[in-house]
Amino acid sequence: MTECNNCSKYFKGFKRVDINELLSNSSYNGDIGLRWKRTKGVMDDILSRYKDPKIVDLAVGGGEDAMFLIKKGYDVVGNDKDDYLSSVAREKARKNGYSLRINNEDWVNILDSENYDDNEFDFAYILGNSFPNYLFDKEDREKALKGFLRILKPKGVLFFDTRNFDYMLDNKEFILEDPENNFRYDGTCTYLKSEDYRCFPTAIEDQSIHWCSKNYSTSRYGCLDLWPATEGRVRDDIETVLGGKVYVETFYDYGKERPDHYDFIQYKITKV
């Protein structure tokens, strides 16, 4: 587990666990049907453009999103390098009477992986604030993007989301005065505002944010370090690696207009 940066004061009486134990819990994601509605038709519009689209969930996690799409009749493959999360997702699929193929491939290895063919998928998605902020090294991010593009069919779409890291960096001092209460999270997008969970940063630096998730109902918490994937940084990585090969659209909590505050930013990258 990632070492906490003096953040134990926010979790008195709580037990520290691996954050994947929290993130894989169904209650963390909330009502998946409601979550999908809050994509405001963006995801449905993407999928409606293909006949029997082949889909890969590149950060399958606990499997909630993959299972939702499988139940709707889509062909979905999962990917997660974490063995624990993969086992949780497979078990959820089994209990629902489905078989879910999951590759345990690191994103940086997809470019050369035999688990994936060239031009294999119509739609590749990464939800849950994981790419690119799990990758601190620019070369790793660039190699991952090249791999994602390799496995997409022409006119296929890569879709991922990140938290509003611009907001965190711009409001560092105010947030850190009282992170649990000062960090603004509206919870009106796809990651539902739950009474059980609270997520917030306890350390904010230009190249690293210490992120914690707190479950009040179980008195457990978990933390990890994230690379602050600001919009400018993400656009720079995309342009460096994929410029001229893709068409990029951005959404702010699944809206085209950038509001004064948003929880997440989404990137829709279409292979030309």
Image (tube, rainbow, N blue to C red):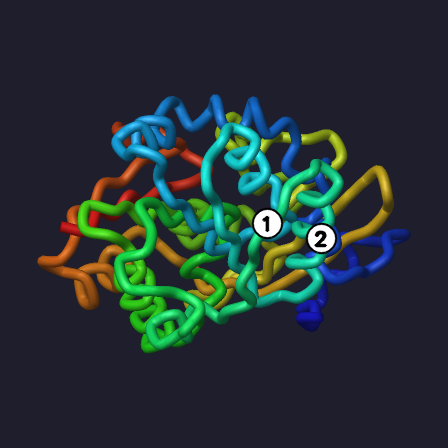
**10 Å crowding of disc 1: few (<14), some (14-19), many (20+):** many
**10 Å crowding of disc 2: few (<14), some (14-19), many (20+):** some
Q: Secondary structure at mark 1?
A: loop
Q: Residue at x 70, y 36 (%)?
A: 96
Q: Is residue 188 left or right of residue 221?
A: left
Residue 230 screen position, x and y as percent: 35, 54
Q: Residue at x 59, y 38 (%)?
A: 67
Q: Could you tell me the amino acid type at mark 1? A: Leu
| Residue nearest the observer in this picture, 125 or 120 | 120
Q: Could you tell me the amino acid type at mark 2? A: Val
| First-in-chain label (2 vs 1) | 2
Residue 171 screen position, x and y as percent: 45, 48
**Residue 213: which numbered mark, if any?**
none
| Residue nearest the observer in this picture, 98 or 39 | 98
Q: Is residue 246 visible?
A: yes
Question: What separation in Å lies between label 2 and label 1 (alpha carbons)?
Answer: 11 Å
